[in-house]
Amino acid sequence: MPPAKPAFPRCRLVPLTLAAALVAAGGCPWLAGAAAETTNVVIGLLLPPEEAEASSLRAGVLLAVEHANQAPAPKVSIVVRGRIGQWGADAVEAARMVLDDGAQGLIAPPNGAATHLALQVAGRTAVPVISLCADSSVSRTGVPWMVRIAPTTIQEAESLFAGLKANASDPQRWVALVPDGRAGREVSRDLTQAAAGTHWKLKRICQVSSTLTNFESLAVQVVKDQPDAVFVWLDPLPAGRLTKNLRDAGFAGKLAGPSRCNSPAFLASSSQASEGFLVPAIILDEIGEARLLSFQTAFRQRYGIEADLTAAEGYDAATLLAHILKENNPQSLPRAFPLAFSLPGASGDLCFDAEGNRKIALRLSIARQGRFRPD
C-alpha cells in the first residue's frame, strides 16, 4: 500500500495567472502561493519547483504553523511561492511575498541560488531570512538579519574527515561527487577548504549533471581512480542511486555524504548499498532526542510518512521565525539580530553566532540495516 500523501492545511490561493492555472490542473503543486485568513504574523516560504526536497520542507513548515496556532494569538499564516524561470525569477517571487502578500519574514530552501536571491530581497526590505542552505557563502552576504538552520558544508565535511582520520594513519585519497553548476562550485570550494590541513589528498571532484539518470559509467570511472573514500555530496535520491552504482561497480572504500542523506529517500534508492554510509549528525542530549522523537511522531500522525532531516529543519525554521516575529514589532526586527537567545528545536537547540551560523556539535552516523545509527 503506497504511503499517504501529505495533507496540508486549507489555504487561500494567491493569484499567479498561468502558474495558478497549472496548480488548479494538478500540473505543478509547488507553484502555488498560499496564505490563511488574515493574521498578525505572516511567514513566506520560498520554494522553487525544482527544489529536490520541496515536499519535506513544505510539510515541516506547515506542521510548525499548525503547532504555532495552537498557542494564543497572534496567529500565524504561511504564503508559499516559487516558479520556474530564468535566474532571478525566485527573487521576484520573494519580493512578491513581502510586498504583495505581507510576509514579515522569509524561509529560504537548501537551494543556494534561491537563498542568495531571498537575501537580496531581505537586504532591501529588512525582512529576516531563515535559511536551510549549507553553503558557506550564505553567511558572507552582508545581510545581518539572517540565520542558518542547517550545518554548513564545511562543518559537516570537517566532522567526516576527522572521523575517517581516526581509522587511518597513512595519507588517504578521496573523490567528491557534487552537483553541476553554481551549487557544485560552492560545495567543491567548501569541501576543499574542509580537507585543508588533513591527511586526505583530493584525487578528483566530479560534477554530476542534474539531467543524468544513469550513473553506471560515472561509477566505473570513479572506481578506476581507486580512492579510499568517496563523498557523494548530492540530494538524497541521486545520492542513493549513485551509492548503489558505486557498490555494484566494485567500490569497497568509505562512502559518505551530507546530513540530508539521512532520509527515507536515500535509504530506499540505495537499498542494501547504504550499509556503512556515513553522514554527520547533530549531537543531541536526552531531552533533545525526546523532542526529535516527538516531532517525528507528530509528523507521521499528520502526514502518514516518515520525517527526514529537511522536514525537521523546515519545522525549526518556521518555529524560530514565528517566535521572532511574535516577539518583535516590524520596526524593531532588524535590531533583533544577531539572535542572543536559544530556542528548543526538533533538530536540536537553535542558537547562533554573530554571523548567523548555527552553534552545533556534530558526530558521525552510519547506515546499518536500513537506518542511521551513531557510529
Image (spheres, rainbow, N blue to C red):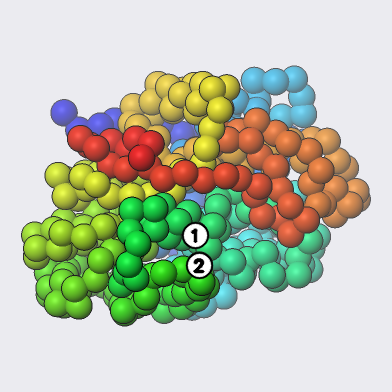
Mark 1 or mark 2, earlier in chain: 1
Q: Position of residue 283 (x, y in %)?
A: 52, 37
Residue at the image position 43 percent from the left and 27 percent from the top: 296
Q: Quadrant of residue 7?
A: top left
Circle 1: element type: helix
Q: CA distance from mark 1 to mark 2?
A: 5 Å
Q: Position of residue 168 (x, y in %)?
A: 33, 59
Q: Quadrant of residue 133?
A: bottom right
Q: Quadrant of the N terminus?
A: top left
Which of the pair 4/15 is nearer the observer? Answer: 4
Whether tag 1 and tag 2 are in contact, CB under 8 A, the answer is: yes
Residue at the image position 57 percent from the left and 75 percent from the top: 88
Residue behind mark 1:
158
Q: Quadrant of the C terminus?
A: top left
Q: Which mark is residue 194?
A: 2
Kind of residue at badge 1: Glu
Q: How many marks?
A: 2
Q: Position of residue 332 (x, y in %)?
A: 90, 48
Q: Is residue 284 above or below residue 104?
A: above
